[in-house]
Image (cartoon, rainbow, N blue to C red):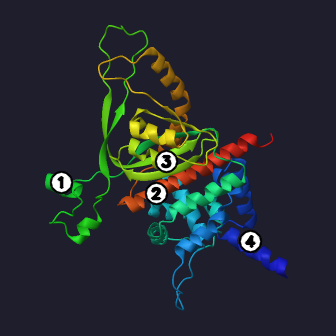
Amino acid sequence: MDLIHFANDASEAVMAGQPGFFDLSDRYEALSAAGDPLERLGSVVDFEVFRGPLIAALRRSVRGKGGRPPFDPVMMFKILVVQALYSLSDEATEFQIKDRLSFQRFLGLGLDGTVPDATTVWLFRERLVQAKAIDRLFARFDAALKDRGYLAMGGQIIDATVVPAPKQRNTEAEKAAIKEGRVPEDWKPAKARQKDRDARWSIKYSKAKVREGADPKAAKPVDLAIPMFGYKNHIGIDKAHGLIRTWNASAANAHDGARLPGLISRINTGSGVWADTAYRSKKNEAFLAAGMFKSHIHQRRKPRQPLPERIARANTRRSKIRAQVEHVFAGQKHRMGLVVRTIGIARATIKIGMANLVYNFQRLVWLEGRTAPA
């Protein structure tokens, strides 16, 4: 009798134009055969390790009777992972979960399951912001990496990049007030909530390259100075595995060199530290020496003097290693489309932190794939 009812239900679903059980199974098999990246991610990363830190961050008073029960915190966290992977807004995330089978399978949602709406996603992330949970989540996964044998090894590479945010349209008086840490007097609360007073302008310099075969006596091309508005992602990766081990977020105008002490990992088995010239200072060199680290920070050219050939060769050797960190930023900017759409440093921090955490997820998938048997 049960089989008859099942057959009738399946035939009614097909007649109604809805996918039946076997249709859905076939579609999942097709997704797997095509190499669904979310399926691979879910098979490599154990998201249950985040349940404890998530519950601790979301702990609240006992709920009253009635109302919809909360969504599973690990599933909600995986929604933030999807957002970071594909640079989705909350509204776009809700739509894509409803639209894409790969998203539903990754999140453990069926076709008849309730999908969290955009407001629910926003509220979940906001509670993590208030609990300052991203540091604990990042540390929890770093511990999981060590448990799997991915120790921080070979030394560390330090760098930073600007993460763009929507530009602000402010008057000169408003800009001056913001720089002084004040809210402009004529801003009403509703307007102040829509203004990002933590993001800042910075200048990104792009080195101009000399064309092959160019006349050595000809004028050198001018370096490009590109103004950018937003925040900075400061990271330290280990040289052996290319995993992000330390990070922090700041306004875009923060000085890179001043962040070096906070980015140095003391548990890396290698003593070498690689970074560009922005990190070279007497204070940083003394800090590294006191900690028994070996500095491989690029040396600067003295004003109006050519760089000695010996130092130029040393910088070239350092660049070959330091370039590894650029793969991180390229992945975040080009594949993940990292931007900050939220307002304020607290929300920007969880956005940047999730991007760093998700990069490590993807890096682990790559590392595991490299060692997997053919």
Residue located 43% across and 13% down the image: 212
According to the picture, the residue beneath numbered tag 1 turns out to be: 176
135 and 354: which one is in front? 135
Is residue 86 something that shows in the picture?
no
Q: In this picture, is 38 found above or below 77?
A: above
Percent of width and height locating residue 239: 60, 38
Give the Cα distance between marks 3 and 2: 18 Å
Give the Cα distance between marks 4 and 3: 60 Å
Q: In this picture, is 186 found above or below 307?
A: below
Q: Amino acid at mark 4?
A: Ser
Tag nearer the camera, 3 or 2 = 3
Tag nearer the camera, 1 or 2 = 1
According to the picture, the residue beneath numbered tag 4 turns out to be: 11
Residue 263 shows which numbered tag?
3
Q: Are marks 1 and 4 in contact (CB under 8 Å)?
A: no
Q: Residues within 10 Å of mark 2 (few under 14, many from 20)?
A: many
Location of residue 240 (image quadrant) = top right
Percent of width and height locating residue 28: 71, 57
Tag nearer the camera, 1 or 4 = 1
Q: Amino acid at mark 1?
A: Ala
